[in-house]
Image (cartoon, grey):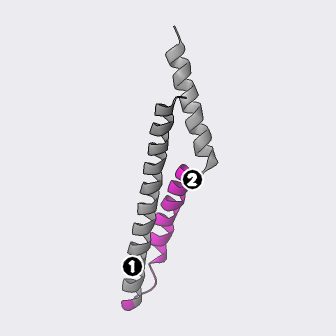
Amino acid sequence: MDDHGKLREAKEHVAALKGFYIHGVIFCLVMTGLFIINLAADTPWWVQWPLLGWGIGLIGHAVAVLSPVSMIAKNWEQRKIKQLMDKP
C-alpha cells in the first residue's frame, strides 16, 4: 500500500473513532437526563430499558471501530479489491 492509501485509511479510522466518541458522549448525556427524569417522576423504573437497548448499540459500535476483527475484515476487503482489479 502506498503512502496515499495509508493516509486515506488513517483518516477513515480517525473519522470512525470520532464518530464513536461522539456517540459515547451523547449516550452519557441522554442517559443522565433520562435517569434524572425517571428519578424526579414518581413512576416505576423504566430508564434501564433505553439504557440496555442503546447500550447494546454502543457496544456494537465499539466492536466495529475498536476490535482487531474489524481490522482483519478491512485488510481482507483491500486484498479482495486488489485481487479483482488485477484480474484480466
Residue at horizontal 38 percent and vertical 73 percent from the top: 30
Vertical position of residue 53 compared to residue 68: above or below: below
Identify the residue under disc 1: 34
Vertical position of residue 44 compared to residue 84: above or below: below
Q: Residue furthest front?
A: 3
Gap between marks 2 and 1 measured at Cα = 27 Å
Residue at horizontal 49 percent and vertical 43 percent from the top: 10
Vertical position of residue 7 compared to residue 50: above or below: above
Residue 23 location in percent, x, y?
Answer: 42, 62
Vertical position of residue 86 compared to residue 33: above or below: above
Identify the residue under disc 2: 66
Using the rendered view, name the quadrant where residue 12 is placed: top left
Tell me which numbered mark, 2 or 1, is placed earlier along the sequence. Answer: 1
Q: Quick one: SS at disc 2?
A: helix
Query: Who is closer to the viewer here, 59 or 15?
Result: 15
Residue at horizontal 53 percent and vertical 22 percent from the top: 82
Residue 8 location in percent, x, y?
Answer: 45, 38
Q: Quick one: SS at disc 1?
A: helix
Q: Report the label total.
A: 2
Q: Is residue 57 left or right of residue 71?
A: left
Residue 42 location in percent, x, y?
Answer: 38, 92
- Specify few, some or many for label 1: CA neighbours under 10 Å numbering under 14, 14-19, or 20 or more: some
The quadrant of the image that shows the N terminus is top right
The residue stretch that appears in magenta: 40-65
- Specify few, some or many for label 2: CA neighbours under 10 Å numbering under 14, 14-19, or 20 or more: some
Is 57 inside the magenta-drawn segment?
yes
The amino acid type of the residue labelled 1 equals Leu
Q: Main secondary structure of the magenta part?
A: helix
